[in-house]
Structure formats: structure tokens, C-alpha cells
Amino acid sequence: MDIGKILYLALQGFFLGFGPCLMTCAPIILPYAGTKRTWQEGFFATLSFSLGRIVVYVIMGGLFGYFGAFILKFYYSSGIYYYIQAILAAMLMLIGAAILFGKSVDFKFCGVDEGNMFIVGMLVALSPCLPLIGILLEIALLSKGFFSGFIYSLFFGLGTMLSPLLLLGAVIPLVGGRVDAKRFRIFTYLCGIMLILVGLYLIFRRAS
């Protein structure tokens, strides 16, 4: 295992986490974190979201390392990508609607509420942006098998976690925590609407 390649991919993940990953993930996770009352709840919801992404990264990296880049062509040509996008959009809209009506959406993973965001994180990772596709292709070229692809993707994923997203996820509940119950309810309404709008955007982007 090449330590230099591992550090290189971790560094790429770090810079990607400050750019495209932050721009893609912030509109999804931060409105959800904003419905929490404490920084701990917001932090762990964001952490769960990030861990969901890493789980998918390491699996995809391992598959790319073993099968090569042609698996990406199959992923898009088979239409799986578009089904994942539709599921992600539906889940975001469902969570947003539940927030608007003061209900809970029970997609718990391992019995914790943050499991909602773990699943969403997995779906986001299964809908890779162009920079992430480039990284996966790079891992396919660098890897000599499933294990090396797994390790490279793991350190890349850990690099993406070292971004402002975790800090923002912890800070945003403090905004709602400073207001009274009535204003906090209005704040959560806005968060729910934002999640619905992100879901609608994914649907219309797919249709265009």
C-alpha cells in the first residue's frame, strides 16, 4: 500500500470538502440540523450524514479497484443513478413535510434519530458530483484490487469530513436555540421548506 497515494487522496478529500462537497451537502444537512435544539444534536446529525457518505465511498472505491472504471459506465447506463436521485428527492421532501407538520419521520438506523441523515448521506454519495466521479476514476487507476480501492476511498472520505460542514451543523442549532418557542417553530418551518425545495430541485434537474 502506497502511503503517498493515501495521503494524496486524503488531501484531495480535504480540499473537496471545502468546495464542491460543501456546496452540495450544506443545503441538504443544514436545514435538518437547524431543527435541533442543541449543538450536540446538530453535530451528531451532521456526523451521521458524513458517515453515511463514507460508507458508500469505501464500497464504491473497493468496487472500482476490483472491476475498474467500466462499473461507472454501467451505473449510469443502467439508470440506477436516476432512481437513486428520485429516492433522495422523495426522502428530502418527506422529511421537510414532516418538519412542517410537526411530525417525525422514522427512518431510524440502528435505533437513533440521526439514522435519517445516515441514509440521506448514503443516497447523496450514490449521486456523485463531477469532482467525485473524477476521484473515483482516479482510484480505479491507482488501485490494484478491492482492498486498495477500499483504503484509498476510506482516507478520501475521512478527508472530506475535515470540512466546515461538521462545525456548521453544530453551530446552526444555536441560532434556533436563542429564540422562543414560537420563533423557533417559524425557523423550523423555513428549514422544512428548504428541504422540500432541494428535493424539488433534484426532480426538476432530472427532468431537464
Image: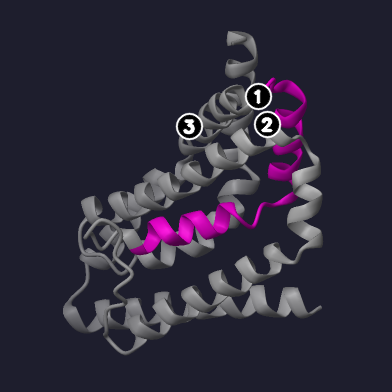
Identify the residue position indicated by label 2 in the image: 66
Q: Is residue 15 magenta?
A: no
> Where is the C terminus found, in terms of image quarters?
bottom right
Question: Are the residues tagged 2 and 1 within 8 Å (C-beta)?
Answer: yes
Give the mark toward the camera: 2 or 3: 2
Task: Please report whichever mark, 3 or 1, sits nearer to the chain's N-terminal start.
Answer: 1
Quick check: 172 above or below 2?
below
> How far is disc 2 from disc 3 in space, using C-alphas?
21 Å
Identify the residue position indicated by label 1 in the image: 145
Magenta stretch, residue numbers = 116-144
Residue lying at 51% horizontally and 30% vertically, measured from the top left: 154
Q: Is residue 138 magenta?
A: yes
Identify the residue position indicated by label 3 in the image: 158
Nearest to the observer: residue 118 or residue 32: 118
Nearest to the observer: residue 40 or residue 125: 125
Task: Please report whichever mark, 2 or 1, sits nearer to the chain's N-terminal start.
Answer: 2
Residue lying at 50% horizontally and 63% vertically, measured from the top left: 28
Question: Are the residues tagged 3 and 1 within 8 Å (C-beta)?
Answer: no
